[in-house]
Each structure stands twice: as C-alpha cells, then as structure tokens.
C-alpha cells in the first residue's frame, strides 16, 4: 500500500509555504514537522502569536487568530499514484513543537 509521507503547504495564492513531514495520521487529523520556505516568513509572526495565545489560554485572542489563519486559505497537496491531491487545511496550528491540521476536500 502506498503511504503519503509529506504534504506541501500552500496559501490561497498558491505559494508553497513549506513541506510537512508527516509523523502521524489519524482519520483526517495530521501531525508533523514543517520545513518552511521563504514564502512562510510573512506568516511567522501570526503563528507565533497564535501559539502564545493558546499557551496562555487567551481564548478570545486565540479565536481571533484562528479566524485570521483560516482566512488565509491554506491547503495541502500530496502526490499519490502520479496524481496531485489537494485538501483544505482546517484547524491549522504551526507551533515550535510541530504542525497539526485536519484535512477536508478542497472545493
């Protein structure tokens, strides 16, 4: 059976922001490590703010930042049997400890 080991993280403008090396998949939840590209630099502070707010349980701020992240339209691509598959990245969290996201069909 073919196993997908990495995903390419892209923003709504189709810029590749990094590669996610997958460490765990459970249903539609993916955990891994982000290897960022230079395109990710514009988003670094947003994800750092989100991690800080989550770690300090600043719930209103965390909710606002999650909406801001969702509005950026991140999605992931994977190659499977010579086909490119695309999925929406939902609940995307990029932290110093790694990446988690849920995937949904991209419409």
Image (cartoon, rainbow, N blue to C red):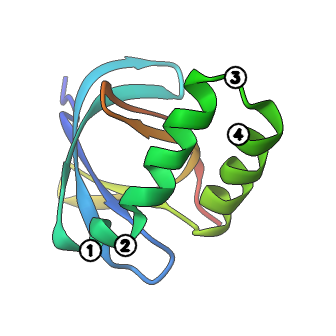
Residue at (65% x, 66% y) in the render: 107
Q: Residue 100 lies in what quarter of the image?
A: top left
Label of residue 74 in the image: none
Label of residue 39 in the image: 1
Residue 103 in view of the camera:
no
Local crowd size for mark 4, using a 10 Å CA cut-off: few (<14), some (14–19), many (≥20): some
**Gap in Å between the C-alphas at discs 3 and 1?**
29 Å
**Gap in Å between the C-alphas at discs 1 and 4?**
23 Å
Q: Nearer the viewer, residue 48 or 68?
A: 48
| Residue at numbered disc 2 | 42
Residue at (18% x, 30% y) in the render: 2
Q: Compared with residue 14, is residue 96 higher up or lower down, i.e. above or below?
A: above
Q: Nearer the viewer, residue 84 or 81?
A: 84
SS type, badge 4: helix
Residue 7 in view of the camera:
yes
**Gap in Å between the C-alphas at discs 4 and 2?**
19 Å
**Gap in Å between the C-alphas at discs 3 and 2?**
25 Å
Kindly check if marks 3 and 4 are in contact, taking CB atoms under 8 A apart as contact.
yes
Residue 28 placed where, x, y %? 53, 28
Q: Earlier in the sequence, mark 3 or mark 1?
A: 1
Kindly check if marks 2 and 1 are in contact, taking CB atoms under 8 A apart as contact.
yes
Residue 56 placed where, x, y %? 62, 23
**Gap in Å between the C-alphas at discs 2 and 1?**
7 Å
SS type, badge 2: helix
Task: Point out the frontmost of discs 2 and 1.
Answer: 2
Q: Earlier in the sequence, mark 3 or mark 4?
A: 3
Task: Point out the frontmost of discs 3 and 1.
Answer: 3
| Residue at numbered disc 4 | 62
Q: Compared with residue 23, is residue 14 higher up or lower down, i.e. above or below?
A: below
SS type, badge 3: loop
**Gap in Å between the C-alphas at discs 3 and 4?**
8 Å
Q: Earlier in the sequence, mark 1 or mark 4?
A: 1
């Amino acid at each position: 059976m073919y196993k997908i080991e990495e995903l390419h993280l892209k923003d709504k403008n189709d810029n590749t922001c990094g590669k996610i090396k997958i460490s765990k998949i459970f249903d539609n939840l993916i955990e891994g490590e982000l290897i960022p590209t230079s395109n990710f630099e514009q988003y670094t502070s947003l994800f750092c703010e989100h991690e800080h707010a989550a770690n300090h349980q600043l719930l209103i701020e965390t909710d606002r930042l999650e909406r801001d992240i969702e509005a950026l339209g991140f999605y992931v691509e994977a190659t499977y049997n010579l086909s490119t598959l695309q999925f929406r990245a939902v609940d995307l969290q990029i932290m110093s400890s790694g990446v988690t996201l849920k995937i949904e069909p991209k419409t």
